[in-house]
Image: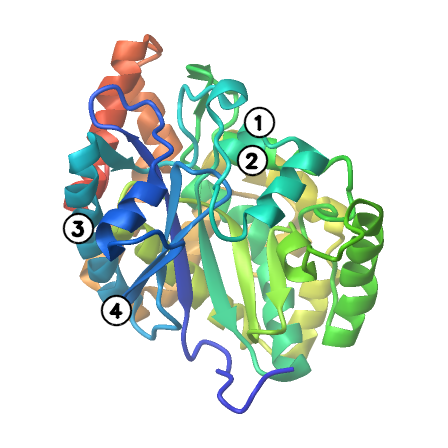
Amino acid sequence: MNGPAALHLFEGVGLELEYMVVDRETLDVRPCVDLLFRDYSGFQVSDVDNGPIAWSNELAAHVLELKTNGPTADLGWAAHDFHSNVQLINRILERHGAVLLPGGAHPWMDPAGEMRLWPHDAHEIYDLYNLIFDCRGHGWANLQSAHLNLPFCGDAEFARLHTAIRALLPLMPALTASSPILDGAPSGWLDARLEVYLHNQERLPELTGRLIPEPVRSEAEYEERIFAPIMAAIMPFDPDGIMDKYFLNARGAIARFDRGAIEIRILDVQECPLADCSIARLIVESLRSLTGSGWPALDRQAAVDTERLRDLFLRVIRDGGAVVVDDREYLQLFGIREKAMTVMEIWQALLAQCSSALDVAALDVLNLILSAGCLSSRINQALEEDYRRENLRRVYRRLADSLQRNKVFVP
């Protein structure tokens, strides 16, 4: 249940950004996040509190997570905080010949040979995950995401927020896909990270469900329909009860009743914090509009079949904003009366509805994405169908520079 300090809808937001640590020259992955933490703190830790931004480890030892240190009401300012931390981290990593690299997946990492699990605090959880699922695959070892956390207080607010997120979820990768290359070659998906993520836990399908979450409206219903099957599925593999239901839930958006928040997990990390924060602001404002429509509209959102949403999601992670949506019932959820629109045209309509809530910097980033395409599309344009390692390095060095300078990537 939510405590007395719980935030209401849209009173704050939490954002988490994951980056790869790679060799400064070769851009091969470098599993040395623990060295970064040791250098900064003077001893081995798994978390760093650096004022408005906190650092933490992930399952893979080459992945670093930066996150707002609690909810923030100003994602525009958070972009500056993230950027200053990126610059600090890169200065420390330079001692080890390493640098941060953005993007949803490393373009040539071999997870079977290069995956290193985090060896320090909480390694028991990671070890058990590895035992059950074998984490030497792209879906475990090679994926960097942005997690957007939005607050709610009580079942009524949860129902409004969860219902709206569920409806908007399939459209989000059109903005955020940044993982077109795997194993040194085009994957065939603009969001390859999400395509492999779908197969992570096929051994225990209850953990991911259909990725699009079920249309639930209360904590009790969530416990019955989602958490109970998850815990029943894991029980034979976890007799000591190490795993936590929140940690196990792998849907595209997960409810954290312990925190009074819903965490959106399907966003690839972008080339710079300014891009991540601008996209997050558009998503937040779009959800604000959807949740403010009243219960008749929310009932229509909740009534959309999960398989219809999943089908759209799969098309979007493959082809991005060019996907045509001709489901008039679905389009009407967003106040759109046309018979058919591309996904990017839907986002253009949503941006037009909320542009007054955004500043010039965010609008510039979003207009570039809407016109030039998601980061995956821009990476593909820059590569010009040349997938030799030297050309991949050339383009991804530019991405590392975009992160260091907090500038959007233009082919």
Measure the C-alpha gap from mark 1 to mark 3: 31 Å
Where does residue 273 sit, x and y in percent of width and height?
28, 51
Which residue in the rendered view is the most extreme toward the bottom?
4
N-terminal label among 2 and 4: 4
Measure the C-alpha gap from mark 1 to mark 2: 6 Å
Mark 1, residue position: 137
Which residue in the rendered view is the most extreme toward the front?
43
Amino acid type, mark 3: Leu
Where does residue 128 sit, x and y in percent of width and height?
66, 43
Label 4's element? loop
N-terminal label among 1 and 3: 3
The dot on residue 51 is 4
At a point 39% along the width and 36% down the height, the residue shown is 62
Measure the C-alpha gap from mark 3 to mark 2: 27 Å
The dot on residue 88 is 3
Measure the C-alpha gap from mark 1 to mark 4: 34 Å
Amino acid type, mark 2: Trp
The dot on residue 140 is 2
The one of 356 and 3 positioned closer to us in this rendering: 3
N-terminal label among 3 and 4: 4
Label 3's element? helix
